[in-house]
Image (cartoon, rainbow, N blue to C red):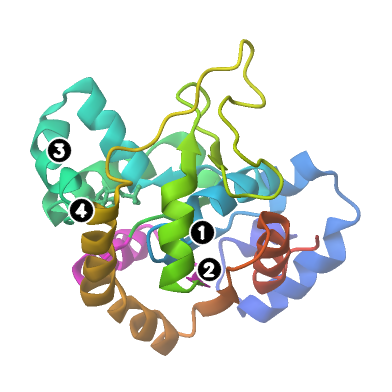
Amino acid sequence: MLRLLQWVEVPTAFKDNLKLKQTSAFDRLARARYLWRMRIVLLGAPGSGKGTQAQRLVTRLGVPQISTGDLLRSAVARGTGYGLRAKAAMEIGQLVVDEIVLGIIRERLAESDAALGYVLDGFPRNLAQAEALASMLASIKQPLDAVVLFEVDYGEIARRIAGRRTCPKCGTIYNVHDAATPGITHCKTCVPPPLLTQRPDDNEQTVTKRLAVYDEQTKPLIAHYRAQGLLRTINAQGSVDDVTARLLQALKIKG
Ligand code: AMP
């Protein structure tokens, strides 16, 4: 039934109700394949936990996380044309020019796994990107379902960024300040466990710049998406599990 509804315009509330009724009858894989084609944007300052929660939504919904930061870091590491042009801006905490980011996102959204929906993490980051995304999605009749704003104090952000570590092999994000992983140094899932790394732009000076850029260029998206009725706001402080619970509730996904 929901599969058919994807091709006709019906009110979102009706589809939401139907999803909730049907989820108990399907296992997680079936739910991911047939029901949840959610296109979600995670919005929030750097270090607000978007990446960590996006990784959890990937497991829950079976849709890919699309992080422009990860795509750009990969382009830089591979030395592609986009990467070479993006590197300098990333090192000083500035936004990479829209032309590059939009080129990268257009290519990624065209990949087959994105047809199941996706979690956009770190994109869009300014109004021009939001408008470009809206027109890309309008042309394929696949509008966004929700934009979730992560609210965290800037003091807490500085602490989180200083403690953030990433597994170079599987990309899992950890935090040395997290009660579940205090002082963590090695990945908990990879065998043999690689030493976790710290992002080069996760230093105090660059973080101050990144937060200023967020205030100036990304924050206007809050009013933009609120006016479209897409915005849902969550308190993103507290344990990772608590934030996941709030996120699922905001998206009306059963925990
Ligand atoms: P992130 O991993 O999301 O914190 O992004 C790391 C860096 O990549 C940012 O500080 C920017 O330099 C760049 N970046 C990531 N996403 C975007 C975007 N949507 N627009 C412009 N620059 C971006």
Looking at marks 3 and 2 on the same chain, the residue that comes earlier in the sequence is marked by 3
Q: CA distance from mark 3 to mark 2?
A: 32 Å
Query: Cβ–Cβ below 8 Å for labels 4 and 2?
Result: no
Which secondary structure lies at badge 3? Answer: helix
Q: Quadrant of the N terminus?
A: bottom right
For label 2, the residue is 145
Q: Quadrant of residue 189?
A: top right
Looking at marks 1 and 2 on the same chain, the residue that comes earlier in the sequence is marked by 1
Q: CA distance from mark 1 to mark 2?
A: 5 Å
- Marks 4 and 1: which is nearer the front? 4
Give the residue at x 24% y 30%. 75
For label 3, the residue is 87
Looking at marks 4 and 1 on the same chain, the residue that comes earlier in the sequence is marked by 1
For label 4, the residue is 93
Please name whichever residue, 47 or 120, is drawn nearer the observer in this view of the structure: 47
Span colored in magenta: 124-150
Give the vertical position of 45 relative to 77 (above or below). below
Q: Is residue 237 left or right of residue 110?
A: right
Q: CA distance from mark 3 to mark 1?
A: 28 Å
Numbered label attached to residue 39: 1
Q: CA distance from mark 3 to mark 4?
A: 10 Å
